[in-house]
Structure formats: C-alpha cells, structure tokens
Image (cartoon, rainbow, N blue to C red):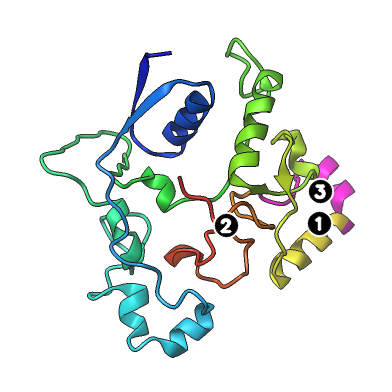
Amino acid sequence: MTERIVIVGSGASGVHFAWTALQKGRRVLMIDVGRRRSSELVRPGDDFQALKRNLEDPVKHFLGENHEALILPGHDGEYYGFPPEKSYVFELVAPFRFQSQGFSPLFSFAAGGLAEAWTGGCYPFNDAELAEFPFGYKRLAPYYAEVARRIGISGEADDLARFYPVHDHLQEALTLDEHSTRLLETYRRHRGTLNHSFGCYVGRSRVATLSRDLDERKACSYTGRCLWGCPGLSLYTP
C-alpha cells in the first residue's frame, strides 16, 4: 500500500494506532512537537531513600530550584505538584492559547503527551458504559488484550471484575504494601456484609506497571521513585 496515514500527537492513543497501522503494512507519519526530558535519570540504581542520602542537594532535585513542585492550600494554579523532571510535560508552546469555561483543560506538547506524567490506572469500559455505542465490550476485548500485551498491565480477577471486565494478557498483580494488605484482608473478612448491605466492592487496581520483565523494560523493583521517573522503565510511557 502507498497511502500514508498522518497521526498528530504521540500520546498513548496515537502511538498504539500507529503501531497497529504499521503491523498492517501501512505507511505512517507521526507529527508532534516532542518536548523531552532534559537530562538522564540521576543515580538509577538508588531507591528513594538512598537517593535522598546520596544527592548533594536532594531538596532541589525533588522539589525544584524554587520549590515549584509544592502545591500549597489556596493555590490557584495546577491541581498537582510535579517534580522538575516532569516540567517539560506541561510547558506550552507560543503562540498557543486556549479559553475554557466550566472545566479546566490540560495540554501537553511532550513526546508521549500527558501519559508521560500519568501512567496509572487501566480500566476497560463495560457493557453498561457502552450501552449507547453500536458495539459492546466483547468487540473491544481483543484490542484491550493486545494493548495489555504490548505495554504490560498488572492486576487480577477479583470483585471489581463486575465493573472492569478482565481481558487477556494481564500480568500478576504488584506486591501490596502493609497498609493495602491489611485493608484488603479486612474487606475479605467482611465481604458479604459490605457487598449486600452497602453495595461496596474492593479489589486491586490495574496499572500499566510491570510485575515481570517485558522486552527491555524491567519489573517494578519498588524503589519509590515513580513520580520522578522509573529507573527500570517499569511504568509505561508512550
């Protein structure tokens, strides 16, 4: 085929559309401003605690030159504070402007888009949510499974499956910390009452984070450096 598909933006949707089109033998041109991280990860072998001990100026590294990563009560700007390493994700490009009323849009001119800052939950639509579409979850399931195979999604089939259908190629769930372990164990002891009397269901999140190695990316080593950039590339980014 000689037709070329032009994709504007290198976020998760664009990347996987391009990947699929290439697999089908199509020619693809992806266009993006493509801002990128300005430097390599610092001391990739250190976990969060070791990094605090070993950095010459940990406050500057974690919070920024002027503590710009801190969001204080009453702050009128962004909802979240991001470390200096992620500032490129939200830098706008002149003369780009926007107006909004009633909602607060977020934009990114980073290579990979906003997914360079948020890589977390992966929850498929269920039949109820797709009721007004001409197709249901069954039609989408193979595509959810393919993306899961490509990027690595960890999770398990549990009580939340009634809300988030379970597709193929899920990796094993990540290891819980002590707080989450106790919470889940307590829920399991009182599951009947919580389910039937309160309509309350608890389960594991499904996240685009590896629990086992995938290609050149390494399984999560629980360094605690997620927000500042995963040293092993365990968290998926486009």
Furthest toward the left, the residue is: 95
Furthest toward the top, the residue is: 134
**Amino acid at the residue labelled 1:** Tyr
The magenta span reads 189-205
Residue at 42% of width from left, 32% of height from top?
Answer: 14
Residue 194 - label = 3
In the image, residue 204 lies in the stretch drawn in magenta? yes
**Amino acid at the residue labelled 2:** Arg
Q: Is residue 13 visible?
A: yes
**Of label 2 and label 1, which has the lower sequence position?**
1
In which quadrant is the N terminus drawn?
top left
**Image quadrant assignment for residue 93:** top left
Are the residues tagged 1 and 3 within 8 Å (C-beta)? yes
Q: Is residue 71 visible?
A: no
On the image, the x and y values in percent for residue 136 come to 66, 17
Mark-to-mark CA distance, 2 and 1: 34 Å
In which quadrant is the C terminus drawn?
top left
On the image, the x and y values in percent for residue 141 come to 68, 26
Q: Residues within 10 Å of mark 1 (few under 14, many from 20)?
A: some
Disc 1 target residue: 187
**Amino acid at the residue labelled 3:** Leu
